[in-house]
Image (tube, grey):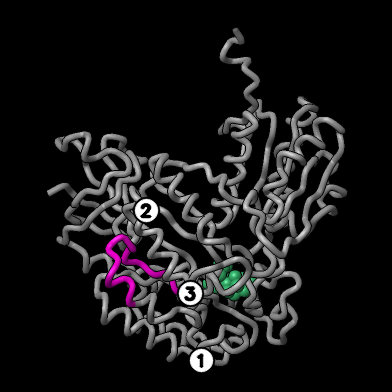
Amino acid sequence: MIPAETNGEKRVFLETFGFQMNESDSERILGLLKDINYVRTEEPAGADLIIINTCSVRDKAEQKVYSALGRYRGLKAENPGLIIGVSGCVAQQVGARLLKRVPYLDIVFGPQNIHKLKDLLDEVSLNRSRVAAVEQNASIDEGEYGYTEPGGSKAYVSIMRGCDNFCSYCIVPFTRGREVSRKSPEIIEEITRLAGAGVKEVILLGQNVNSYGTGGQGDISFTGLLKKVSKINGIKRIRFVTSHPKDISDELIYLFNDEPRLCRHLHLPVQSGSDGILKNMRRGYTASEYMSKVSLLKKLYPDMAITSDIIVGFPGETESDFEDTMRLIKEVRFDNIFSFMYSPRPDTKAAKFDGQLPLEVRSERLKVLQEAQREISIGRNRELLGRTVEVFIEGPSKADPSERYGRTSCNRIINFPAAGTESSLVSTGCIIDVTITEVFPNSLRGMVP
Ligand code: SAH
Ligand code: SF4
């Protein structure tokens, strides 16, 4: 018999930059690798394979990858059998040039080529070649999906890929290609499999989930898909990101009323409060159109959390444009926002616009926006004090493992003591009532009543 430690298991160290879409790609990469006997390690030293999964939506993404790769150069010198790969948006954007620039890099593969990873690894280890796979595919090969490796009781599931909106600042349509929806039966099959493996919460992912089904192989509408997902046994909570304000339908808005498993949270990025800037961003709505959707949501669902993305310092943004944005966040009172300084991205139209603003102006506006939002977020959290809410337990608290942390339906993180409560009620994946006793800007504290 082969001893356990030499049973052919190989170790992969995977580093992820970016946000949910990249986390989801990483889960797919790990799922694929598991099939060929790789286990994840938290230590790059001693790994057989290192993958950096990248994001290029903001900042100096390419630079960040070079410095990350620099950290692994020594490991490759010590162990020439080590395979190093770069995946994600930077891989797609820079392509084979990355191989030229980094001589110890073996594989470059874009987000539409994850399903080829096993073949790419074979090519490297059997033929000692260095390979780049960055072709854009017009349709979805189901092999690309369906491998999601559940990281616990919740899982991200991509329902579509790419984007056709071409907002003038955004690199996504260039790195992730045209919008294509997956076929609904395959999505349902994947979620059913995940539910069988213990997943209780799914987060459906797409750059613009509201237009699911209108492109590629989509066969039903987004609301049709949500209704089907909510019937899957074992799935207790459903979330989705990102909703585009121009495409959110009344049908979806009213579905929250009928479907208790849909979490009371909508991430609805507004980007700016100025009509002129929204037009130059090519967002397809005005500030007042956005406000009327938000007013309807707030009227129908007072307990719903609404969050947003905002870009400050877009080319040509005047003080008065910025004030429009400040006014909008104060009027909506978002539960939280992700806010960014505009950063010019290669290939995008806005990178060539007149009126690019200096860094000091962009960072000062970001500071002013974030300070105002911090107060609003604390205020919104305070409104929850004393309320008893359902919490989906995600695991032991990081700071004190005798406590638990979880998420409210409105997507707030909450910590609470678990001692004294029957352990079967406070294990990961359970939903339990918790009374909110204290609030902070980014989390809550509570107790089991
Ligand atoms: N599809 C989603 C967003 C994807 S990118 C949507 O349309 O809302 C996530 C966020 O990154 C965007 O909402 C935007 O706020 C920010 N972002 C994208 N490109 C950016 C850029 N060039 N500079 C600064 N922020 C940017
Ligand atoms: Fe980018 Fe706009 Fe598409 Fe969102 S909708 S991914 S911001 S192009």
Which of the two residues, 326 or 123, is positioned nearer the viewer here?
A: 123
Name the spot of residue 86 as percent of width and height, x first.
72, 47
Q: In the rendered structure, find residue 320 and report the number of the disc placed on it.
A: 1
Residue 220 appears in the figure: yes
Q: In the rendered structure, find residue 418 and report the number of the disc placed on it.
A: none
Question: Which residues are drawn in magenta?
Answer: 254-269
Going from the N terminus, do you reach mark 2 or mark 1 first? 2
Q: Is mark 3 within 8 Å of ligand 1?
A: yes
**Screen quadrant of the N terminus:** top right
Residue at left 31%, top 71%?
A: 256
Which of the two residues, 150 or 416, is positioned nearer the viewer here?
A: 150
In the displayed structure image, the side of residue 343 where residue 390 appears, left or right: left
Q: Which residue is mark 3?
A: 269
Q: Is mark 2 within 8 Å of ligand 1?
A: no
Going from the N terminus, do you reach mark 1 or mark 3 first? 3
Quick check: marks 1 and 3 in contact, CB under 8 Å?
Answer: no
Task: Estimate how packed mark 1 is, as few (under 14), some (14 to 19) or many (20 or more) residues with alpha carbons within 10 Å.
Answer: few
Going from the N terminus, do you reach mark 3 or mark 2 first? 2
Q: Which three-letter amino acid code belongs to the residue tagged 3?
A: Pro
Name the spot of residue 20 as percent of width and height, x first.
52, 56
Look at discs 2 and 1 and give the one toward the viewer. Answer: 2
Q: CA distance from mark 3 to mark 2?
A: 29 Å
Q: In the rendered structure, find residue 232 and report the number of the disc placed on it.
A: 2
Quick check: marks 3 and 2 in contact, CB under 8 Å?
Answer: no
